[in-house]
Amino acid sequence: MVSQVRDTGWFKSSYSGAANETCVEVRLTDTAVRVRDTKNRTAGTLAITPATWTALVTGLKNA
């Protein structure tokens, strides 16, 4: 049996547009959420747990 791992690939928020220069890209997997700067993709990534990502997004929505 082959195990399927979720990996969304890198994507930008739907709020990011051509005129928005302060974007980040996100990549969701089963074990981590990775975040990187759209303008400097080779500068490294931040990796956090899916639970931490959910708490961050929820907190931002409620702010």
Image (cartoon, helix red, strand yellow):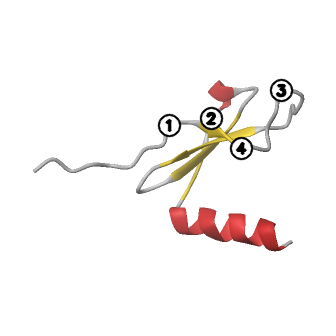
Q: Residues within 10 Å of mark 2 (few under 14, many from 20)?
A: few
- Answer whether labels 4 and 2 touch (C-beta < 8 Å): no
Look at the numbered disc 4 and give the secondary structure of its residue: loop
Look at the numbered disc 1 and give the secondary structure of its residue: loop
- Answer whether labels 4 and 3 touch (C-beta < 8 Å): no
- Answer whether labels 2 and 3 touch (C-beta < 8 Å): no
Look at the numbered disc 3 and give the secondary structure of its residue: loop
Label 4 or label 3, whichever comes before in sequence order: 4
**What type is the residue that disc 4 sits on?**
Ser
**What type is the residue that disc 3 sits on?**
Ala
Whole-number angstrom distance, CA of label 2 to CA of label 3: 22 Å
Whole-number angstrom distance, CA of label 4 to CA of label 2: 19 Å
Residue 9's disc is: 1
Residue ID at (67%, 30%): 43
Circle 4 is placed at which residue position?
13
Q: Nearer the viewer, mark 3 or mark 1?
A: 3
Circle 2 is placed at which residue position?
44
**What type is the residue that disc 2 sits on?**
Gly
Label 3 or label 1, whichever comes before in sequence order: 1
Whole-number angstrom distance, CA of label 2 to CA of label 1: 16 Å
Q: Residues within 10 Å of mark 1 (few under 14, many from 20)?
A: few
Residue 18's disc is: 3
In the rendered structure, the answer to whether residue 41 lies left or right of residue 2 reads right
